[in-house]
Image (spheres, rainbow, N blue to C red):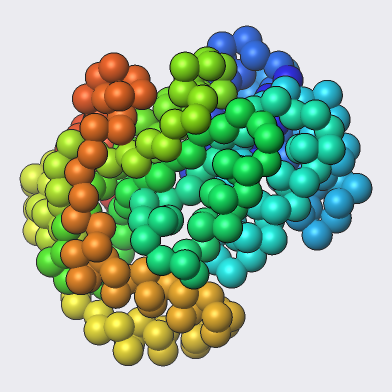
Amino acid sequence: MILITGATGTIGSEVLRRIAARGEAVRALTRDPSRARTPPGVEVVAGDFDDPASLERAVSGVDGVFLVAPGGPSTERYDLAVLAAARSAGVRKVVKLSSIGADATDDHWHRTGEQAVRAGGMSWTLLRPSAFAGNALQWAAAVRADEPVPNMTGTAAQGVIDPRDIAEVAVEALVSAKHEGQTYTLTGPELLSFPDQIARLEAALGRTIKTVDVPLDVVREQMLASGMDGEMVESRLRGLKIIRDGGNAVLTDGVERALGRPPTDFGAWVLDHLDAFVTN
């Protein structure tokens, strides 16, 4: 039995779908099972990292855990709570979805969780993906309405990766022993800036997309006005500054090492998701 945490998120849901398609026994952990949309045969359980008893039930009888923590100041608490339950239940393997640059600063959201995974006595694999290609879906409503898409990262480049590649690596790490003890930094095949990604979308759509540069002080005001917690706001701003300063301008062979094939390029992702950007 494999437990997928974050089972309704971008990566967790894709890992769940792929694991289920392979015929593996799989359990999905979510705060609200009534809202979960899962493949047939998937067991769905309720759980919350602030409820240890719910986590104990979730990991009962489980051999492997895909650990996906919500990004932000709560990441450390979530990671440690799930790992404690997993160790107590005798879970053999954990695959943690971390983030590129998790080892770059002492205060990174994922740093403590990574350390706990390595020291936890279970077999482990760490996945450190770069920016998700799927983040571009946040622009879809503006593109459809012909409104400006906000640019918060300037011309800084990142190794934008297709979330399906991340999920495929996660599945292989969960079902195969050959990835144990590995840390994979996962990127796409090329460095792309916001303008680069917009240009790929424009080429696919056959029209111009409006954009607007948003300074970080304005980003802060917008986040606070939306009701976002102040600690979360400052954490996200630090991440944006790292990107703007070139900290994510990294390409690796992580996908190829894990899967034996090159990573999917952003243009292919765009074509597969073009309907989201088209007005019906």
Q: Say which residue appears at 70% left-offset and 25% top-offset.
A: 92
Q: Could you tell whether 190 is left or right of 47 in the image?
A: left
Q: Residue at x 27, y 25 (%)?
A: 256
Using the rendered view, name the quadrant where residue 198 is placed: bottom left
Q: Residue furthest top?
A: 23
Horizontal placement of 41 versus 196: left or right? Answer: right
Could you say where residue 165 lies in the image, as x and y percent from the top left? 36, 31
Name the spot of residue 132 as percent of width and height, x first. 35, 48
Q: Which residue is more in the foreground, 95 or 26?
A: 95
84 shown above or below 150: above
Who's the residue at 25% across and 84% down the image?
215
> Is any atom of residue 89 visible in this view?
yes
x then y, percent, for residue 59: 80, 34
- Left or right: 40 in relation to 21: right
Above or below, 40 relative to 114: above
Relative to 173, is 160 on the left or the right?
A: left
Above-or-below relation of 135 to 66? below
Q: Quadrant of the N terminus?
A: top right
Can residue 150 be seen from the camera position used here? no
Residue 267 in the image, given as x and y percentages of width and height: 17, 38
- Please tell me which residue is depicted at 20% across the width and 71% down the height of the picture: 245
